[in-house]
Image (tube, helix red, strand yellow):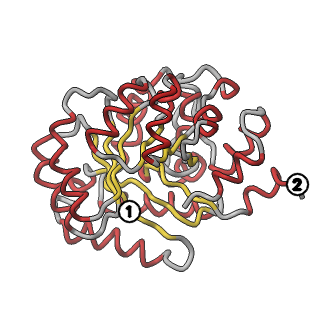
Amino acid sequence: MNFTESIKNIKKIDVHNHLNLGMQYATYKKWAGFEIPDFPRKLNGLDEMHEIIGKYTRPRCKTSQDVVDLVTMSIKDALSDNVEILEGSIDISFIGVFDEDFDKFFNSINDLVEEYRDKIDFRPELGIGKTFDHEKTSRWAPVCIQSGVFKSIDLYGPEVTEGIEDFAGLYKLCAKKGLKKKAHVGEFSDAASVKAFAEFFDLDEIQHGIGAAGDDKVLRFLADKNIRCNVTPCSNVMLGAVKSLKEHPIRKMMDAGVRVSLGTDDLLFFNRTVSMQMKDLLDEDVLTEAHIRKILEER
């Protein structure tokens, strides 16, 4: 068995995974009881993706057990790809599904951590959408950050600096409580925005970050600050952020000294596991075996 064939059998991490959409489509549709037409497929950016979420996946998640089921499916599908460390995002909006019963919400997450402890290091991540109800975020997020349940935080939504000051206090609280600080930026935005987010929030890691490849100085900044970019090439291609896998800037980033991991982002939508993406990058001669081995060393 050559290296490419053995990749799936090698232990790896997935630290860019939204657990409400983190499972294979075959897994999801069996649970959901319906099919999404012409799916998975290339999409016209985030707008079309959110149309599908709004029409199909979000309405299907109605109960606290649904939330537990979604996270469980995502954990199991990560295990099937030999993921040993899973930093999976649990969206703050799920607290509403739990009727703001924080104890029940936290216990449900902790129960999953314990249930799979011998199989995978599941590290729950608090996911916050920039466009989510700010009043609820201001009430719910500090409780979550101080709970000890979450090991990291991730902010996602429009990749613009406008409004990020609203979340400054939460990131300072995360720093105080020892949570890893992440944010989505640089999939559809430029290098300047990547640097701005990294500096403003004092980020430990960036979800995507590929826009940094447009400026060698920003790549050097990321390398010097040891800020890892958790890249999902399949997302970047299927949402049109890059024209093709062949043109993906991941090699430029790595050759500039930027630490990189590969994540699944939303496996339900993009249909490529971490192992599959590694093979894809090798098959397209985007990365060499040495690059992939370096990614596999990330922890």
The residue depicted at 44 percent of the width and 42 percent of the height is 207
Q: Which residue is mark 2?
A: 2
Residue 55: x %, y % from top left: 37, 33
Element assignment for label 2: loop
Q: Residues within 10 Å of mark 2 (few under 14, many from 20)?
A: few
User: Measured along the vertical axis of the image, is residue 11 above or below residue 137?
Assistant: below
The number of discs equals: 2
**Residue 149 badge:** none
Indicate left or right for 96 with 287 as reference: left
Tell me the CA gap for discs 2 and 1.
Answer: 34 Å
Indicate left or right for 180 with 35 as reference: left
Indicate left or right for 227 with 35 as reference: left
Q: Quadrant of the N terminus?
A: bottom right
The residue depicted at 65 percent of the width and 56 percent of the height is 296
Residue 148: x %, y % from top left: 26, 70
Q: Quadrant of the C terminus?
A: bottom right
Q: Upstream in the sequence, badge 2 or badge 1?
A: 2
The amino acid pointed to by label 1 is: Pro
Residue 22: x %, y % from top left: 49, 50
Residue 256: x %, y % from top left: 59, 36
User: Measured along the vertical axis of the image, is residue 105 above or below residue 153?
Assistant: below
The amino acid pointed to by label 2 is: Asn
Element assignment for label 1: strand
Asked whether 248 or 251 is in front, the reply is: 251
> What is the residue that sits farthest to the right in this orientation?
1
**Residue 124 badge:** 1
The residue depicted at 43 percent of the width and 60 percent of the height is 71
